[in-house]
Amino acid sequence: MKAIICQQYGPPDQLLLTDMPSPKAGKGQVVIRVEACGVNFPDTLIIEGKYQFKPPFPFSPGGEVSGVITETGEGVSHLNVGDRVFSMTGHGGFAEEVVADAKTTLPMPEGMDFVTAASTMYTYGTSYHALKDRAGLQAGETLLVMGAAGGVGLAAVQLGVLMGARVIAAASSEEKLAVCRQMGAAETINYTTENLRERIKELTAGNGIDVVYDPVGDRYAEPAIRSLAWKGRYLVVGFAAGEIPSIPLNLALLKGASIVGVFWGAFAQREPKTSTQNFGQILHWIKTGQLKQHIYKLYTLPQAPDALRDLSERRVVGKAVIKL
């Protein structure tokens, strides 16, 4: 099979398109013929050795795929050869075939296309888990989404609107913010040209934010936490801007606030029943047209390094997908 391979840590330019042996399904696993693979921020980290998991060399990046099952391993009873599925694989998806854990592989609903399926798990899975399970977002609350034009950010904007929140989207350009408004954001903040704290004060009449969804981190984290309302919740989703911030914990004390970690991958592994229930709701919203992924661009497998470069340089609005 053809695969994009990482042989040593480094930038996307060091990735190689080469032939690799087809994978085999072990106990509790399936082999999927990949039709599409979502491109996500962890893919840019894993090839540089900066992610929580470090697979042995050589490996393919690509943590979420859609495709058709070609083999099932021992103990797999709910999936069959020929099933159209989508799966969280962690890595290995930038390839014609991938082995996946059956517990994190779901049948595709009737009528769903492979591109939609391959761009659903990380974005909507992460954001719904964050807003529902970790923040307990309630209708009528104010939600600030940082990095709102990225994959998980735009998903959080859409889900926040569906859950009845007043959504304020923060991003780095007017072009990105225009897409956020199309997805339902009530207000927007351009944090490259506007003062984040002052703009939040203005938009909330000084009352602050109930929930901050932050996949960006770095210098934006502290002003966002300082802008929380009483009993506000700050969701730690990621650090796309670079540095992992150090936060004065007295801010949580003074505001009666919560700083809450969001690690959807671990949640899906540790709490598969709840994760599957979440996806039931997400898939219902997709089927009824209430959720629709914004696809920035489709890339071929040989163009996978270009997709990672576009993502790391923050050109991608919504989701980049590799279509095989």
Image: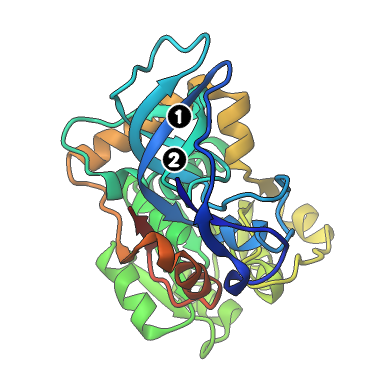
For mark 2, what is the residue?
Answer: 97
Three-letter amino acid code at the position of disc 2? Glu
The residue under the point 30% across, 55% down is 293
Residue 10, image x, y percentages: 70, 69
Occupied quadrant, residue 201 = bottom right
Mark 1 crowd level (few <14, some 14–19, many ≥20, 10 Å Cα): many
Q: Can you name the residue that lies furthest to the bottom here?
A: 193
Three-letter amino acid code at the position of disc 1? Val
Residue 129, image x, y percentages: 51, 39
Mark 2 crowd level (few <14, some 14–19, many ≥20, 10 Å Cα): many
Occupied quadrant, residue 113 = top left
Q: Is residue 6 left or right of residue 169?
A: right
- Residue toward you, 150 or 207: 150
Residue 157 seen in this snapshot: yes
- Residue toward you, 256 or 215: 215
Q: How many marks?
A: 2
Q: Is residue 51 left or right of residue 204?
A: right
| 76 to 306, vertically: above or below | above
Q: Could you tell which of marks 1 and 2 lies nearer the N-terminus? A: 1
| 25 to 319, vertically: above or below | above
For mark 1, what is the residue?
Answer: 31
Could you tell me which quadrant the N terminus lies in?
Answer: top left
The residue under the point 38% across, 32% down is 279
Residue 178, image x, y percentages: 31, 77
Query: Is the Cβ of the residue at disc 1 closer than 8 Å to that at disc 2?
Result: yes
Residue 121 seen in this snapshot: no
The residue under the point 39% across, 54% down is 155
Q: CA distance from mark 1 to mark 2?
A: 7 Å
| 147 to 256, vertically: above or below | below
- Residue toward you, 33 or 45: 33
